Image: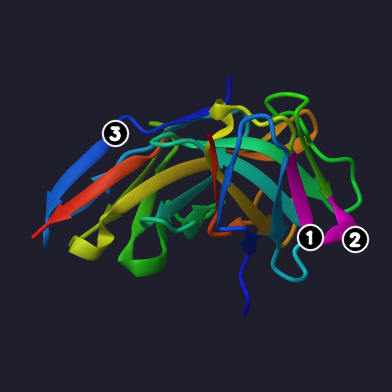
């Protein structure tokens, strides 16, 4: 079955430290991978995507993600965390099912950055 | 430019009543999606419209749920005979096309509470 897994419910990191939010996927064919962020009481915002090309993808707010085909992972990273990065992060993969393109989301990882 | 808008932002209804939730996608976006996000949970796909094609209804949880998209723009999600388990945030998203490379842009959601 095609799926996305975010193994950590919550990640805690001190402000100024690097952060990593993990994501692994299982799809048939080439993966099309996305990261979204959800701030409290707001909708999801697109951060970045991997379609093809360089394995390191840069996105909004200083975030980047590394596509690793052998490990089927697409971890989100940021060199120096800010308190304002505290939010819920979703990894997603685009799949084809029943002739339709669908976006399958992971369960989400809550990032808490403390001063 | 204007993003995806949804109305109402909050809806409280009594069990057994029908509700209608509205989504205005970004102008020019041909694809429109509905998701449900229950408290502390990830996103559950409900339905997907792409242009004039038949919608992908595979995510609708029961026949009490239906959606339509008029004129290829505004969409309405209808829940008949609401149940308490329908309480959730209903998110709408649109994308420029239905292809796998397109990111989705989300509205702020409608928080539905069934009492």
Q: CA distance from mark 1 to mark 2?
A: 7 Å
Q: Quadrant of the N terminus of chain A?
A: top right
Q: What residue would you read off at disc 3?
A: A9
Horizontal side, residue A26 vs residue B101: left or right:
left
Image coordinates for residue B49, horizontal then vertical, percent: 79, 47
Q: Quadrant of residue A24?
A: top left
- State if disc 2 and disc 3 touch (CB < 8 Å): no
Q: Quadrant of residue B70?
A: bottom right
Q: Nearer the viewer, residue B42 or A27?
A: B42
- Residue A67 or residue B30, whichever sits in front: B30
For mark 1, what is the residue? Answer: B74
What element does badge 1 sit on?
Answer: loop
Residue at far top of view: A1
Q: CA distance from mark 3 to mark 2?
A: 41 Å
Name the spot of residue A5 as percent of width and height, x first. 42, 30
**Disc 2: host chain:** B
Which portion, as a residue range, is magenta?
A: B69-78
In the image, A29: left or right of B29?
left
Q: Position of residue B26 (x, y in %)?
A: 69, 68
- With A17 as the anchor, is A20 left or right in this view? right
Residue B10: image x %, image y %?
54, 53
């Amino acid at each position: 079955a095609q799926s996305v897994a975010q193994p950590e419910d919550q990640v805690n990191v001190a402000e100024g430290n690097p952060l990593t939010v993990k994501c692994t996927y299982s799809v048939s064919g080439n993966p099309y991978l996305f990261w979204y962020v959800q701030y409290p009481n707001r909708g999801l915002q697109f951060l970045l995507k991997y379609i093809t090309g360089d394995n390191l993808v840069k996105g909004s707010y200083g975030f980047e993600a590394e596509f690793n085909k052998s490990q089927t992972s697409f971890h989100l990273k940021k060199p120096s965390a800010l308190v304002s990065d505290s939010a819920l992060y979703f990894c997603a993969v685009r799949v084809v099912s029943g002739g339709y393109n669908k976006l399958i989301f992971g369960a989400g990882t809550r990032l808490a950055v403390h001063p | 430019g204007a993003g995806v808008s949804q109305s109402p932002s909050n809806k409280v209804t009594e069990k057994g009543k029908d509700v209608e939730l509205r989504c205005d996608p970004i102008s020019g976006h041909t694809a429109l999606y509905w998701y449900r996000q229950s408290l502390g949970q990830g996103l559950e796909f409900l339905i997907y419209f792409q242009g004039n094609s038949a919608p992908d209804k595979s995510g609708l949880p029961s026949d009490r749920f239906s959606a339509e998209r008029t004129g290829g723009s505004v969409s309405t999600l209808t829940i008949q005979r609401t149940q308490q388990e329908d309480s959730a945030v209903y998110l709408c998203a649109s994308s420029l096309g239905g292809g796998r490379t397109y990111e989705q842009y989300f509205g702020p959601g409608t928080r539905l509470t069934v009492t």
